Image (cartoon, coloured by chain):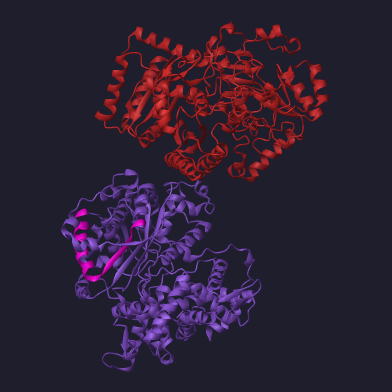
Chain colours: A red, B purple
Amino acid sequence: MASDGHGSERQRAASRRLSAIAGHLRTAGQQQRPQVAGIHCKAESSSDGEEAARSTTVPRRRQEVMKWNGWGYSDSRFLFNKKGQAEFTGRRYRLSGMVLPSLKDWFESTFGASLQHKSPATATLNASAVPFPSLNEAFLQDLKSTGIPFSHEAEDRVFRAHGHCLHEIFALREGKFGRVPDLVVWPNCHEDVVKTVDLACRHNVCLIPYGGGTSVSSALECPPDETRCIVSLDTSQMSRILWIDEKNLTAHVEAGIVGQDLERLLNESGYCTGHEPDSMEFSSLGGWVATRASGMKKNVYGNIEDLVVHIKMVCPRGVVEKSCQGPRVSIGPDIHHFIMGSEGTLGVVTEVTIKIRPMPEYQKYGSVVFPNFEQGVACLREVAKQRCAPASIRLMDNAQFQFGHALKPQVSSIFTSFLDGLKKFYITKFKGFDPHHLCVATLLFEGDRERVLQHEKQVYDIAAKFGGLAAGEDNGQRGYMLTFVIAYLRDLGMDYYVIGESFETSVPWDRVLDLCRNVKERIVRECRERGVQFPPLATCRVTQTYDAGACVYFYFAFNYRGLADPVNIYGRVEHAAREEILANGGSLSHHHGVGKLRKHWMPESISDVGIGMLKSVKEYVDPDNIFGSRNLL
Amino acid sequence: SVSQSCMVRISSLYPPPLALASCAKPRDPALKKRDDFEDILEERRSSSDLRYALRCYVPVVYKGIAPCKPGVLKTAVLQSDRLRHVMSKETGESADVIREEASGILEEMAHRLRLGTVRFFAYSLSKAFKALFQRVRVNEDGIQRLQQSIQEHPVVLLPSHRSYMDFLIMSYILYTYDLSLPVIAAGMDFLGMKIVGEMLRMSGAFFIRRSFGGDKLYWAVFSEYVKTMLRNGYAPIEFFLEGTRSRTCKSLTPKLGLLNIVMEPFFKGEVFDVSLVPISISYERVLEEALYARELLGVPKPKESTSGLLKARKILSEDYGSIHVYFGHPVSLRSLAQGRINRSQYNLLPRHIPRRPSQETQAFVNETAYRLVRLQEENMVLRPWVLVAALLLQNPDGVDMERLVEQTSWLRGLAVSFGAFLDWPDYVSASKAVASSLALHTGLVRTEGGRAQLAMEPKEPGSPEEDLFDRAASVLSCASYRNQILHVFLRPALLGMAMQMAEASRKDDIYSCFSFLRDVFSNEFILCPGGTVQDFDEACYMLTKCAAVHVQKQEVVATEKGQRILSFLTSLFQPFLKGYQVGPAPFLELVDYPRHFCFLGFLPSATSELTCYEALSSDVQKNALAALLRMKVVRKLKV
């Protein structure tokens, strides 16, 4: 029905959105032609001049563009301005530079927080508080001779000693440092990694691979009792696309590349991987493989295990890889599945051949309002049953819907605000939806235009059967935006005595509702029993649908004023919430991984024999525990 | 005697007690704070019953859910996955026939709660209660806690069961306090009462068959019906853990069927928690007093019938004193199950497929049931009369009033120190309390010439057997009051008896005797399985506290002062010991269980001692036989 003009407008909007998500980072100095690099390793000729020619967005000195004690870019943060209104600084995101008038009220009323009560972070990193590196001199000597860049500066080491768990960030904000790596190395290519691992084995040095640093499983935490020299192996400089094979639609990529660079570089050749985890701005291909990552558009493109065709990993025992790129093989248990999810305990993933797809012609957001969460889940289940899920479909509960609403930027015209009022009137008064029960599904369709429109109709028709009302593109888009800024919002909360985090699980369809309700209630009850003064925010959304179940994502946060040891209480509540998940038939993790945070539950999750299987692989591949992060087992 | 001879064999099977000293000190039961009571009849006596029955009734409900109509509920049950699964497994009949059958079961079972009927009951019960009782006293703090619970989690109401009045009282109180009316599991027998059965149905009763052994479909419909109500938080569910009215006024061994059903939705994660509310209803005089004694002596229970009910109107002219209803603290099932039940055991099987509970689950349910019954016992209000009854039974030849008052006063002190919930305010003197107790129970006690004695003489002499029957009936009636306080003295008394039995002061020996006695009596009294060590410690603690014994590392020694206490305690339980020694004897010869001959069959050996009248109780005989069978002292033979 839409005119051609309308269509091309949409297309333009689509490409704007693509560049918004994939390209928020591009800084002025780095605007340059994409390059598909040659296969030669350039480590030997590594110099400052060479460095400038790289297309990576991640410099070796990450602290130059990113926060050392919080999420993301240094120039982007939420703050309450002098008028008490929230705004988001910087120029990178759609929200950047905007004022968010309702955030303050939401923040104060949800958490019982007040702008009068601040809990600011330590401003600068006090290098003298960082433990002195314990270096293995022999290793260092040999490393120097390879020419691989390294550093033992405090700032570099601190940056690689943590992921983004609450306790990790909280400690940084207080200027407290535990065991940190003694040395950081930046291999430039597979060969560099082979050399580094070889030296580590020779000198009995502990290696912890570091990709994007977005772990939320304590996987990057250095074991405090590790007495060997700990070397953080930062793959960020291995970020080239080595080749693109248009006949088979694959690309061979170095594992250190971060998501946004991978998409941007492929886009410029007309391709994409379609793998978009919420952390894609910073997380790396190797990290995705090592944690069994999941992307928001997995319904079209698949999760990481569906996307990889070939993996190369350097282990103490040698390099492991398959000898062909057959699309599916029956040659015993798939060795890729030893690698995927190994969380840095077996080796370093250096190169990955990944499936690529032509960029979608058309993209469209959408949203549906349901009278309650139960109806929404029933709709998602039906969509999954009919196998017609859009690229992404997510169902937010009521609390999260209100959270999303609080992030609405200041409306530019009276007309928009009038329209908003009208919509609200229609849904709550005319359709009789209770504003305290209604919930919203956000949708993202992708493909050629005809198909998208057809698909859209199919999904909205199903939604209508469950009482769902189409609620516009804008609501949909804002829903997805929330996931990109949530980590920035946590930093804002932490400035005002509010701490929180997210965690996830996957669960069979018939238990989704029970699990959501019980976990939220458990959180509320645990907080009350542990003396948290204000009711916590406990909210969830169903973020992925599968044939046999769904992925559920929780946000949990509370105001910790009056608590002596908030992080400890936070940890206990999160622990209880995980117990509740497991008791309700949920999995230990859908995509965050196990790390050290959740390994306590591994035996009950995969049985003792299962643990034994993993152990025997570890023992063969890495008998001296060179990859000594002690994740998983 | 039987029990003496088996004692040797059994006690040797028991391992010596484990590290008794290491056990935590039991809490002091007397320290427990209990709520105050309000009389709900007070207002009824001063304002219009009609207006009360017609007033606006807007109860708070679970999470603000609108109660669903009984019809909707039935459909939900019939269409549930569970029922569909079970029906698909039924063979032999066509699907339609099975569905019809399920629907029929549900029709027979389901309640049809109607506000109109509730209002009718509110009106007529107000009239009846005012005529029957002086006061109906309720702890309002308990009501408030309940109101809170109803809003948070599905609630299961677990009243003690002493009388048909129990569930009427319960619904009446909940209506009075504007709380959701419960749906009540009732025995099918009530449906025998023509109009009344249906009226009970319309006031929230649902009816279950007394036994349905292997009928899988019946079980599925029944359990799904209860679970659906629970999951939806439709209304509080009420049932009697004891399964039936206790004819003896002792708590009965809990039945686990319904408790299993209401716990399952929590185990399977379908509800966040379930609040179990123990409720203790105590009657100063039970309406069925005389009937019970006759039943215990083998006269069959009269069939429930409407005409029988109408005939019973004459009780309206008698005074039944006060009723106390104590709503205990809601017990969170989640908290109880913490660390006991691994809920992830339900992860691998679709939840609608029924399966036998695991052993750990069964043990947990059983233990919880005992715990709840003990909570009922603890909060049971005791009137001074139960003390008097206990003393009168120990003095079969009568006792001087003066001495009775002195003894009652002494016993009061002992009972209170053991944590009894005695309704005896300080300003009421012992003589007054005794006098008013005797006044209310003139049918049971004779007071002449400054002496009080059980009324044993038949009004009009009959045959020796009839006289014996009458005497036994009045002893058993009186015993039913004494029985109300047994739970307070049970543990210390077992210790006292064990000390007597062991004939030495070695703690280990006493413990094994204690353990043996506890085992013997575990059908008779509420003794939690596996709680021997705890009970022993509790008994030691209580007797130490009142300076009756001296507990050392290796020894338990009676003190001088303790003689009176110990001898009171052992003689309090003497009838049971006697009953177990001689009670089942005739059956051991007859082998077959001769229900209807229990009275006559025992006659020859039991005319001498008064305490033996109690051995005539079919309840004691049944329990004794069960204990002997359980302990494998006797064996059931095929006839």
| Magenta residue span | B115-141
Please tell me which residue lies in front, B618 or B58: B58
| Quadrant holding the C terminus of chain A | top right
Left/right of residue A401 with respect to residue B511 in the rendered view: left
Rendered location of residue A35, percent (x, y): 61, 8
Would you say the magenta stretch is mainly helix, strand or loop? helix
Please give the count of numbered marks on the rendered protein: 0
Please tell me which residue lies in front, A292 or A501: A501
Q: Which residue: 63% across, 18% down?
A: A63
Left/right of residue A197 with respect to residue B170 in the rendered view: right
Q: Which residue: 25% across, 55% down?
A: B112
Q: Is residue A363 above or below residue A617?
A: above
Residue A442 in sight: no
Rendered location of residue A48, percent (x, y): 71, 8
Q: Which residue: 61% across, 78% down?
A: B557
Residue B128 sits inside the magenta stretch: yes
Rendered location of residue A340, percent (x, y): 62, 30
Q: Is residue A219 above or below residue A525?
A: above
Q: Is residue B34 above or below residue B585?
A: above
Q: Is residue B520 above or below residue A361?
A: below
